[in-house]
Amino acid sequence: MINKLRKLKEKPEHNNYYGKVARGLKFIKIMLCAVLVIGACAGFIFIDELSADSIASLFSYIDIIPAGQITAQEFRIDTDEPVPSGWHRNNIAVLRRSRLDIYDMAGRRSNTFPLAYSNPVLRVSERYMLAYDLGANKLDIFNLVSHVYEYMGEEPIFGARLTDRGNIAYITRETGYTSVIRVLNNNFSEIYAVYRVHDFIMDADISGDAGYLAAAGYYAEDGDYLTSILLYKTDSERPVRDIKIRGEEPYRVKINNNGFCAVLEKSIRFYDFNGDQLARYDLAGRTIQLLELGAEYAAVILNERTFGNDNRILIFDKFGERIWDLPVDTEILDIKFDRDYKYLYFLTRGGLYKIDLEARIFELLIARVNGDGESEYDETAHSIIFADERNIFLAGLLKINILENN
């Protein structure tokens, strides 16, 4: 009897087959738990963006990429002309006339949204991607997995901006008004509107919380331009300030962390949130070629055909102080601040350069053709999509290049 009990207490013999099955089931359970946790977190963070279609699309793109294979050095996009592109949540958006393509960091096209645009414009933020057809009545908003909003109005769109929180401002018109600016919250409900009888609004921008709206417009008076620089608080119909400037056409406005910047035909001006002018820089007859206006700094590229120089780089801080003024003897194709406003990158036909905004020095980061005569990136590269402390992403006609930021 004792021997029988001992045999019952003995450890059962190990079976390799059932061991593999058990390990497989354990792995499946871990993966299911991970998917559920990620799904719950995503649902909590992006609850306003969830729908049956977006959930189905999300699960269709679930994949496991082995470590070391997440980032490619380049991938093909094959466009016939320079097209708008942008960085959205570790993905690259490429807007063509016929569609919006989303590429992941491995260069795989993870989603495509069909469109029919003539003059496509792309805006990106942390929350949404906004595309519109300039001068037509088409405006669409996307996240990575779904088409979340479609403009249903009959009037054309003349400009649009969106914030990282998902607030949107767009410029249109309406019977009886030359320009109308409408502000939507991140649920696409209209929360504010500005109606201008005379001014043709060229640009408008909103603060991150949609508390302030800045706009620039103009109309002809006595044979000259009369520009209005407008600042609104979105809890009041009356503007905080309506600044009149004669003889200059407005180009851009941008709300920054100290007020806003207005770029005009002949000058660049900085204002605080009371509409008081803090600084002004006169262009002295030079023309603006490129602008990069951010929350902390503003960069302006001037076309300057003097003393053998092609361009001049101007950088201003948010108070309007000029911190950089450098002539460059080559054509600058594009400029981009990194996301932390530590550096400004500028792309030329010969290479990619970096300006250290704190140390106020610049260097050639990558020559397009190295010392061995080999190309470091696509020769058709025309714009900088995104830059951070690790990588810089360049867009060309044929490829997206991913360069190491050493």
Image: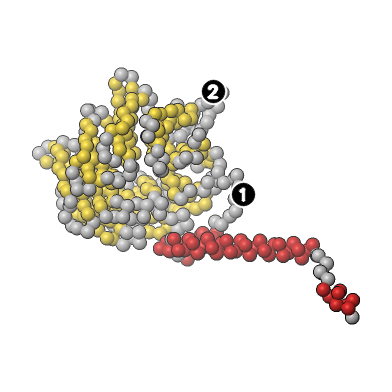
Classify the position of the N terminus by image quarter: bottom right
Q: Amino acid at mark 1?
A: Pro
Q: Quadrant of residue 85?
A: top left
Residue 137: x and y in percent read 31, 53
Answer yes or no: is residue 55 visible.
Answer: no
The answer to whether residue 24 is left or right of residue 377 is right
**Mark 1 and mark 2: span between their CA atoms?**
34 Å
Q: Earlier in the sequence, mark 1 or mark 2?
A: 1
Residue 174: x and y in percent read 22, 55
Which residue is at 33% across, 44% downward? 295
Which residue is at 78% across, 63% downward? 17
Most extreme residue toward the bottom is 1
Q: Which residue is mark 2?
A: 371
The answer to whether residue 107 is left or right of residue 395 is right
Most extreme residue toward the front is 2
Q: Secondary structure at mark 2?
A: loop
Q: Crowding near pointer 1: few (<14 within 10 Å), some, many (20+)? A: few
Residue 383: x and y in percent read 42, 37
Q: Which residue is mark 1?
A: 66
Q: Quadrant of residue 300?
A: top left
Given contact means CB atoms under 8 Å apart, are the residues at marks 1 and 2 in contact?
no
Depicted 53 relative to depicted 162: above or below: below
